[in-house]
Amino acid sequence: MSSPLTCDSLWSGATFVTLRAGQYHAIEDGALAVLRGKILWIGPKAEMPEIHAAEHHRFAGGIVLPGFIDCHTHLVFGGDRSAEFEKRLNGVSYAQIAAEGGGIISTVKATRAASEDELLASARRRLNHLLAEGVTSLEIKSGYGLDIDNEIKMLRVIRRLGEQEPVEVYATCLAAHAIPPEFSGDGDGWIEVVCNQLLPRVAQEKLADAVDAFCEHLAFSPAQTERVFTAARELGLPVKLHAEQLSPLAGSSLAAGFDALSADHLEYATEADARAMAESGTVAVLLPGAFYLLREKQHPPVAAFRQHGVPMAVASDANPGTSTALSLRLMLNMACTLFGLTPEEALAGVTIHAARALGIQASHGSLETGKIANFVHWPVARPAELVYWLGGQLPCTVIYQGERRESSL
Ligand SMILES: [Zn+2]
């Protein structure tokens, strides 16, 4: 006779929506057992084997989903650009604002001037909004330091956030975000510093989990991006790319050629890009917040991504200039209303496909035996409700690595 299983906690009394293989896969009247921070068993309560639980938590209805994963953010930065936002709406032109030192360079100045502790404190305030909405993992990029010391400073802050806050943080080095003021007119010069000095140090100090670049006319060319990717590959770091946001440069195909984890934005991606991404398993990360705030007209080719089987993720792109989004649920709604995703696709986009965009799909993103026990109970009747409401707070219960997490808001 086999002895009964034992677990640290058992959770039941709700519908468990697993998102396995990117689908709802709802288990009505389900149960989920947690042992040492991982899912030991999940299924219909009626089919549960004998399990001795140290604690049994019973929900009174509602649904349980995997913890949300925000796979593209720029959450660490100095200052903010609300004054610039207001100026623009009062009719001041972009050119005038840029001439006055506005735009991304103003964030670079404020980030350089801020201490690690100041950057940590301001990022934590923004992070708390995401956590209150059920985010259990997120990615944060550097890219506002734009010199060696300040890029390292940003990456240290990102690592400290992950150590101090109850959330898994993945750090991405985005030193190829914009041309630093010191290298004005010499993008190649900065790329050389990034490839030969910064990235080797980042790799040696294990300060980043991936390397990213901004491939666009106003940032870096495909040839410069390729140099960054080659350097990253030699250091054993996976890559991702800001691609096809404002114009078609085939950056996403280039990224696919380097087996990139993801290509992000993609409003101008083509059918050929979609095919290349499908072949390499590169995730299409859709960022409706930036599309909205920049009042873009060109939509990402969602139909081509579907047709070729490119997994689609949805993220906040939280940043001080082009996507001041502190709500992943709002992004879910926008991904559906602006880009035409179904609620099921959108929810897969902040769970299992977002996990793939970070290379953690084997352990995260769906409710399956053996995966990390990051899940959230929502007081709603069906998953689509999380996508349906525009704003408003839905109080949720977050279980992070098997333990209930209190909200810091
Ligand atoms: Zn971005």
Image: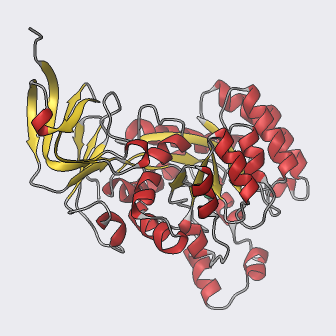
Quarter that holds the N terminus: top left
Q: Is residue 408 left or right of residue 173?
A: left
**Identity of the residue drawn at 51% across and 57% down:** 315
Task: Let me know if residue 172 appears in the view.
Answer: yes
Q: Quadrant of residue 128?
A: bottom left
Q: Position of residue 30 (x, y in %)?
A: 17, 43
Q: Position of residue 197 (x, y in %)?
A: 79, 33
Q: Is residue 300 left or right of residue 72?
A: right
Q: Residue furthest bottom?
A: 91
Q: Residue furthest top?
A: 1
Query: Would you place residue 77 above or below residue 277 in this image?
Result: below
**Identity of the residue drawn at 60% across and 42% down:** 172
**Identity of the residue drawn at 59% across and 79% down:** 85
Quarter that holds the C terminus: bottom left
Q: Position of residue 202 (x, y in %)?
A: 67, 32
Query: Would you place residue 401 above or below residue 185 in this image?
Result: above
Image-quarter location of ligand 1 = bottom right
**Identity of the residue drawn at 59% across and 33% down:** 207
Query: Would you place residue 93 above or below residue 326 in this image?
Result: below
